[in-house]
């Protein structure tokens, strides 16, 4: 598939991926994909990433139920970063973070320290068995 | 500085950075920072990245005039990705991309092909000498 060949995979065969909530514009999370993850994300319409720590594909929400429907896949000018426009399912408002927060980017630099600035919406022990 | 020590730098001493326009929520670009770039971004209030290809610091807009004012610096749950909330200066609407477009993510996957879906706002030859 030509569109997959046009992606510039890094030396590990991966590409960085930003997931943005389509309805709010919130940046929810950042992850990585390999060729198979991107191909399946496009064909299945839901986010499938590649876990570098576990060295395997990881369907977002497979354990937590917090699946991401993918509305749009964008590629940047250098062909080496992907932006997904998603709907975060499984909770309202959406929970993308494994800490039970809406977004993974919940720590803000304030007066020389990282401070949490988003609430935990759901106890992670209830969605990770 | 403790907040800089709490960042998980990768094996090259870098961290991925997402720049999001504060006013619109648009994801403008993706780049990298080293420790000095992040420290200076925080102290100077404007985006300073690290260029992997040129192996040196790169003050966004130093050549193009398309400087990014930084309103907020966020860190993700794993301490290994930064999200900046910025105002993109130098043009209205803001131009973050070296192609003269608003955002670097201007190519959309459509019917199995990457298709440009954002206009060139300004000819890059007018801001790169």
Image (cartoon, coloured by chain):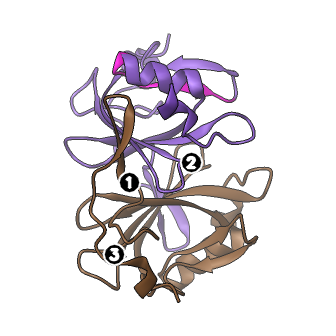
Chain colours: A brown, B purple
- Dot 3: chain letter: A
Q: Are marks 2 and 3 in contact (CB under 8 Å)?
A: no
Chain letter of mark 2 equals B
| Label pair 1/2, CB-CB below 8 angstroms | no
Q: Which of marks 2 and 3 is in front?
A: 2
Read off the magenta span. B44-52
Quarter where residue B83 is shown: top left
The residue at 68%/30% (across/down) is: B52
The answer to which of A98 and B129 lies nearer the viewer is: A98
Which chain letter matches label 1? B
**Residue drawn at x 35%, y 82% as measured from the top left:** A89
- How many residues crowd around disc 2 within 10 Å: few (fewer than 14), some, or many (20 or more)? some
The residue lying toward the viewer, choosing from A117 and A57, is A117
User: Magenta span has A15?
Assistant: no
Location of residue A124 by image quarter: bottom left
In the rendering, at what x and y percent does residue B105 appear? 44, 49
Residue A1 shows in this picture: no
Which quadrant of the figure has residue A67? bottom left
Give residue A28's position: percent from left, percent from top. 38, 61
On whether residue B47 falls in the magenta region, the answer is yes
Give the residue at x 74% y 50%: A10
Q: Please name the residue that numbered disc 2 is placed on.
A: B80
Does label 1 or label 2 sit earlier along the sequence? 2
Q: In the image, are marks 2 and 3 on the same chain?
A: no
Q: Where is residue A3 in the image (x, y as percent from the top left)?
A: 63, 64
Secondary-structure class at tag 3: strand
For this view, does A93 lie left or right of residue A125?
A: left
Q: Say how many tags the image has.
A: 3
């Amino acid at each position: 598939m030509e569109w997959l060949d046009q992606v510039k995979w890094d030396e590990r065969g991966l590409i960085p991926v930003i997931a943005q909530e389509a309805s709010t514009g919130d940046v929810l999370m950042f992850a990585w994909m390999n060729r198979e993850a991107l191909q399946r994300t496009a064909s299945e319409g839901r986010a499938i990433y590649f876990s570098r720590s576990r060295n395997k594909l990881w369907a977002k929400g497979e354990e937590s139920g917090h699946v991401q429907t993918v509305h749009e896949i964008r590629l940047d000018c250098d062909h080496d970063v992907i932006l997904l426009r998603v709907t975060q399912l499984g909770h309202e408002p959406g929970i993308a973070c494994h800490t039970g927060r809406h977004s993974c980017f919940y720590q803000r630099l304030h007066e020389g320290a990282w401070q949490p600035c988003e609430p935990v919406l759901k106890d992670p022990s209830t969605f990770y068995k």
